[in-house]
Image: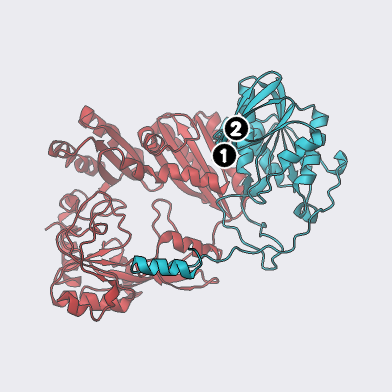
Chain colours: A red, B cyan
Amino acid sequence: MFYESNKKVNHARFKPQTFALLNRSRKAGIGYSQCVLRPKTTEEVSRILSFCNEHRIAVCPQGGNTGLVGGSVPVFDEVVLSTSLMDQIISTNDTSGVLVCQAGCILEKLDTHLADHGLMMPLDLGAKRFLSSWRQCVKANGEVLDCLRYHLKHLFIGSEGTLGIVTKVAIQCPAKPKAQNVAFLGLESFQDVLKTMKKAKYDLGEILSSCELIDELSLDLVTSHLKLNSPISVYPFYMLIETQGSNNDHDEMKMNAFLESAMSDGLILDGTTTNEVSKMQSLWELRERITEGLTHDGYVFKYDISLPTKNFYSLVPAMKERLGDSAKRICGYGHLGDGNIHLNISVREFTQDILDKIEPFVYEFTSKLKGSISAEHGIGFRKPKYIHYSKSKESIALMKQLKAMMDPNGILNPYKVLPA
Amino acid sequence: MARVLVGVKRVIDYAVKIRVKPDKTGVLTDGVKHSMNPFDEIAVEEAVRMKEKKVASEIIAVSCGPPQAQEVLRTALAMGVDKGIHVEVAGPEYETLQPIHISKILAKIVQNEKVDLVILGKQAIDDDCNQTAQMTAAVLDWPQATYASKIEYGSKEITVVREVDGGLETIKCKLPAVVSADLRLNEPRYATLPNIMKAKKKPIQKLTPKDLGVDTSPRVQIVSVEDPPKREAGVILPDVDSLVGKLKEGGHI
């Protein structure tokens, strides 16, 4: 049946074999899809969904396949719809700063393209997410929607492909900062981290662009498994602070003043700061490659949790106490700026026993502190049954109603986000 | 203990994309991020380690270039160098400054400062000349040990392992000598905060080539600077026979 429908789509881009790579995501799950479709245009997405909706075929949309919760991995035999070929940049307006592109564009490529226009992707303080001003989406039944009114676009953001597939976006890009400075610091305690962050917000003000926390064991992952070099010796906590602005002299002065005073206050024990491009990249690598380091550490339970700032790190000691020797490594790192911590528990091998010790304790603990699960990585496949820890019964009911209205045949990313 | 001089050059950061000027007279440098030449960082690191081992008594870093060259000197000072000398050369004079001029400048400073050992990066990543260490040794009539991947220090001589095409060569050099640092000599340290702050108080002396009696008249003329040819896409061939056919077509076999 698919072969017929795909005569409408370019034959060369239709792959009926099982795609090992696309059926697997970062060791988080393995699916059994028999088919991958790679449309190039909104038109093609529309025709695919319209066909699938009519024939009740489940579809699993897939973007970069970097998801950690199995949201982009087919569960059973869903057809994988990959946006990897939808990577066209449609237009760039230097004056308004608006970039229009297809949804399959890779962030890094966009950034490089924008740099030529003196622009950059509008990243928020925490995750490398971006905000769009307009989106074009395709609904489950194939209808193409231009989401401008009623803030319809917000419906689709965060829905993880369960309400529709985004095919095009318009992004308001700010000017590329002329100046960037990065500091990597060593601290004694989480209390010092909090005080330093508060001070950074105050002293650095508008130029503060990132504030990351890395604990000792998280850094150890990249220094021991990936052989990266740390600029300083071992400390219980590290912070990576980045500033961006339009005047390097001004920014460097502010950064140096902040660091000097934080050191004399005894908040920072040691650190380094630089505005050299290659060095800043090396420092960011220490943070960005932690997930890679984890893949060498055994079986890892990953949790992406949002907690009130003062309790940002509380889960880690709590898990250490609860699991004791049964875990190999328990570590946490994340975006202090928006209270989003990545908790990682690595064990030599997976056992149901360990899983039972971890869940639902980790969710109960989070819920008690008024935090929420899946701050950044979404609910995906592994967390729907725990969604009730962060959302009330009423909210979940509304979400289900919305889903039923947008996707009555339930073909989009079934088994994900919402509990059965 | 030896008095050591290290040469540090301000170059476009290696992670930055290089753009050729539309008029093909050179590379765009205005507003582009610069940093210390990576091989020079290795040279500085070696000198600082010598000081830590109490084999060196004082380290002087020298940089020739526009006012911004002081940034590289500050980095060197933050890594542990004792004092910096900035030989100011700017504008068109700087565009045509070559190893031949630098070597004479360094030689004069070496004589003035009574230096025993000069450590330079083996080449700059912008011009890839790989000449300054050799020329400096020639001007001074000192022995040279280039492409050093290991240095052992004696009181009157050094034993250097050099990376050469055929493998590794070990030589002994009497001091004073000139050494050029290769990639595997060491891993440079990051400048840490206490040292970055201390560095602000360390002195940077300003000189001009004239002060040193060096003539910086151009010896080369840049005719044109162009991008390398664009990399073409590959072709996927269906079988071995087509591959062999294509290779023959291209004159590769």
- In percent of width and height, residue A58 lies at 16, 68
Callout 1 environment at 10 Å: few (<14), some (14 to 19), or many (20+)? few
CA distance for labels 1 and 2: 9 Å
What amino acid is at disc 1?
Gly
Residue depicted at 30% across the width and 51% down the height? A375
- In percent of width and height, residue A348 lies at 23, 35
Which residue in the structure is indicated by mark 2? Answer: B169
In this view of the protein, which residue sits in the foreground, A114 or A164? A114
Residue A95: numbered disc = none
A377 vs A38: above or below: above
In this view of the protein, which residue sits in the foreground, A131 or A78? A78
Examine the rendering and report whether any part of residue B88 can be seen: no
Q: Secondary structure at mark 1?
A: loop
Please, which chain is the residue tagged with disc 1 on? B
Residue depicted at 67% across the width and 31% down the height? B81
Callout 2 environment at 10 Å: few (<14), some (14 to 19), or many (20+)? some
The residue lying furthest to the left in this view is A420
- In percent of width and height, residue B219 lies at 81, 53
Which residue in the structure is indicated by mark 1? Answer: B166
Residue depicted at 25% across the width and 81% down the height? A8
Q: In the figure, residue A22 lies in which quadrant?
A: bottom left
Please, which chain is the residue tagged with disc 2 on? B
Q: Do callouts 1 and 2 point to residues on the same chain?
A: yes
| Residues under numbered marks 1 and 2 in contact, where contact means CB atoms less than 8 Å apart | yes
In this view of the protein, which residue sits in the foreground, B217 or A327? B217
Q: In the figure, residue A187 lies in which quadrant?
A: top left
